């Protein structure tokens, strides 16, 4: 996958559009459950780790990757300390679906604050909005060589895992006409056609 396709399909297609649709289709209702605070936060915190590796040209660790992404692409990096995001929010959500703090959807700054009932609160709405705003910067900062290096590592790992589980994959049944819209990352919600965007730098090849 070349860089232009990666930017258009993966970053601006799957990541941005999935987040935008989740954010806009399910609006928070005060004192109700089902406000998708956790999924929004977990998606963004995972995306920043992944994209940070492309800025670095390699996958190092959560804090290093996220630090690179935030400091390169966010205009308010001071609101998002990577160690706090990792230890108290992302790892709790990813491994336990239980953050070591609280998550709100008020859409206000600062993004991390002291709540009335919780010592630490991350606002998922603010995080999503800041992340979406940061994507145009990511697109323009993404270095060709670092992209190629990181993508090769990612693709080699995928092939390694496919080979490891080849017996299982070869034995899978098919579902005719059911996976026409499937994509490796986003499933049926993946963008079905060409993406028109004004945030992509036309100079990117």
Image (cartoon, helix red, strand yellow):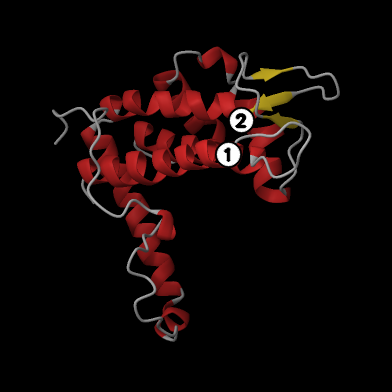
Is 35 or 132 nearer to us in this picture? 35
Among numbered discs 2 and 1, the one appearing first in the sequence: 1
Residue 40 circle label:
1
Residues packed near mark 2 inside 10 Å, few (<14), some (14 to 19) or many (20 plus): many
SS category of the residue bearing label 2: helix
The picture places residue 183, in percent across and down from the top left corner, at 36, 60
Q: Residue at x 33, y 23 (%)?
A: 137
Q: CA distance from mark 2 to mark 1?
A: 6 Å
Q: Quadrant of residue 7?
A: top left
Q: For residue 33, what is the image quadrant?
A: top right
Q: What residue is rendered at 34% in x and 58% in y?
A: 156
Q: Residue at x 47, y 28 (%)?
A: 131
Residue 144 or 177: which is nearer the viewer?
A: 177
Q: Is residue 54 visible?
A: yes
Residue at the location (76% across, 23% down)? 120
| Mark linked to residue 124 | 2
Q: Is residue 186 visible?
A: no
Q: Nearer the viewer, residue 23 or 7?
A: 23
Q: Is 78 positioned to the left or the right of 54 in the image?
A: right
Percent position (x, y) of residue 169? Answer: 43, 79
In the displayed structure, does residue 113 sit left or right of residue 14? right
Q: Are marks 2 and 1 in contact (CB under 8 Å)?
A: yes
Secondary structure of the residue carrying numbered label 1: helix
> Looking at the picture, does residue 201 appear above or below residue 12?
above
* Image quadrant occupied by the C terminus: top left
Q: Nearer the viewer, residue 200 or 36?
A: 36
Above or below, comparing residue 164 to residue 46 in the picture: below
Q: Position of residue 122 (x, y in %)?
A: 67, 26
Determine which of the numbered discs, if any, sits on residue 48 in the image. Answer: none
Residue 180 lies in quadrant: bottom left
> How far across and how far down the image is residue 144, in percent?
21, 35
Q: In the drawing, does residue 113 fall left or right of residue 128?
A: right
């Amino acid at each position: 996958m070349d860089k232009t396709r990666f930017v258009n399909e993966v970053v601006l297609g799957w990541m941005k559009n999935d987040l935008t649709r989740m954010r806009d289709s399910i609006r928070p209702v005060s004192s109700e459950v089902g406000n998708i605070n956790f999924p929004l936060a977990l998606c963004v915190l995972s995306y920043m780790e992944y994209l940070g590796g492309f800025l670095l040209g390699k996958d190092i660790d959560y804090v290093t990757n996220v630090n690179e992404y935030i400091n390169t692409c966010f205009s308010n990096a001071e609101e998002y300390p990577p160690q706090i995001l990792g230890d108290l929010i992302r790892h709790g959500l990813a491994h336990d679906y239980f953050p070591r703090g609280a998550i709100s959807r008020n859409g206000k700054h600062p993004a991390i604050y002291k709540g009335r009932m919780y010592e630490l609160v991350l606002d998922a709405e603010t995080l999503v909005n800041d992340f979406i705003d940061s994507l145009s910067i990511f697109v323009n900062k993404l270095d060709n060589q670092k992209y190629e290096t990181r993508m090769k590592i990612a693709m080699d790992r995928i092939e390694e895992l496919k080979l490891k589980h080849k017996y299982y994959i070869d034995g899978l049944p098919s579902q005719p006409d059911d996976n026409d819209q499937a994509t490796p990352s986003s499933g049926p919600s993946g963008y079905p056609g060409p993406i028109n965007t004004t945030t992509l730098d036309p100079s990117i090849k």
